Amino acid sequence: MKRSIKLYNIIFPLWFLLFFPPIIFLTLIGNYIVDSLVILICFSVYKLVDSGFNLKTFYKKSILKIWGYGFLSDIIGAGILFVLGLFGTRFGLPHELTSAICYDPFSEPLAVIIILGSIAVSAIFIFLFNYKYSFRNLIEEKALRFKIALTIAIVTAPWTFMLPTKWFINGI
C-alpha cells in the first residue's frame, strides 16, 4: 500500500510566491503593464488633456512612482497575510483558518474576509501613496487627484490574493 505524504509546510501560498525570484520579475513586469494601462485609461476617462496635461509628460512623471508605491502596498498587504499564516495560531486563530488564509480562502468565510481586508489595506496604501506623493506636484486640483488615485487603488489592488493555491498545485 502506497502512502501519500503531503508537505503543507513547504508549499507557499500563491500570493506569497509573487515576491520570490524569478516570479518577482514577472510580477513587477505585470504590475508595470497594468499600472500603465490604468494610467492611460484614467488619462482618457478623466479627460486630463482638457486640463492641460500632455499624455507623454503625465505618464513619464507618474508611472515609476505609481508602480513602486503599488508594489510596496502589495507587500504590506501580503505581509499581513504572511504574519497571520505563520503566527495566526499564536494569536488564537484556529489552524483551519490560517490554513484557509494560505491555501484555500473559500473554504472558510472568515478567511475570505481577512484576505479582502488585506487587499483593502493594500488599496488604501495605494490610494494614499498616489494621492499624497505620486500626484501631489502633478495634479493640483484635489478632486481630480482624489478620483484618479482612487481609481488606481481599486483597479490595481492585489486581487490575486484571493486565488486559492490549490488551483495551481495538485495534492493540496
Image (cartoon, helix red, strand yellow):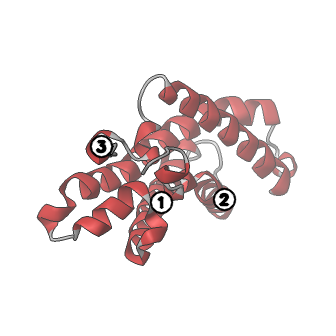
Distance between mark 2 and mark 3 Cα atoms: 40 Å
Q: Nearer the viewer, mark 1 or mark 3?
A: 3
The residue sitting at 40% across, 53% down in the picture is 77
Q: Identify which residue, 85 or 53, lies in the foreground.
A: 85
**Corner quadrant of residue 5:** top left
Residue at which label 1 appears = 119
> Within the image, what quadrant is residue 31 found in?
top right
The reply to whether residue 116 is in sight is no
Label 2 vs label 3, nearer the camera: 3
Q: Secondary structure at mark 2?
A: helix
Coordinates of residue 152 in the picture (x, y in percent): 63, 53
The amino acid on which the numbered mark 3 sits, given as a three-letter code, is Leu
Give left or right: position of 92 versus 164.
left
Point out the frontmost of discs 2 and 1: 1
Q: Which residue carries the number 3 mark?
A: 7
Residue labelled with disc 2: 151
Q: Label 1 amino acid?
A: Ile
In the picture as drawn, the residue positioned furthest to the bottom comes out as 109
> Which percent across, then down, holds residue 88?
21, 62
Give the residue type that dot 2 points to: Thr
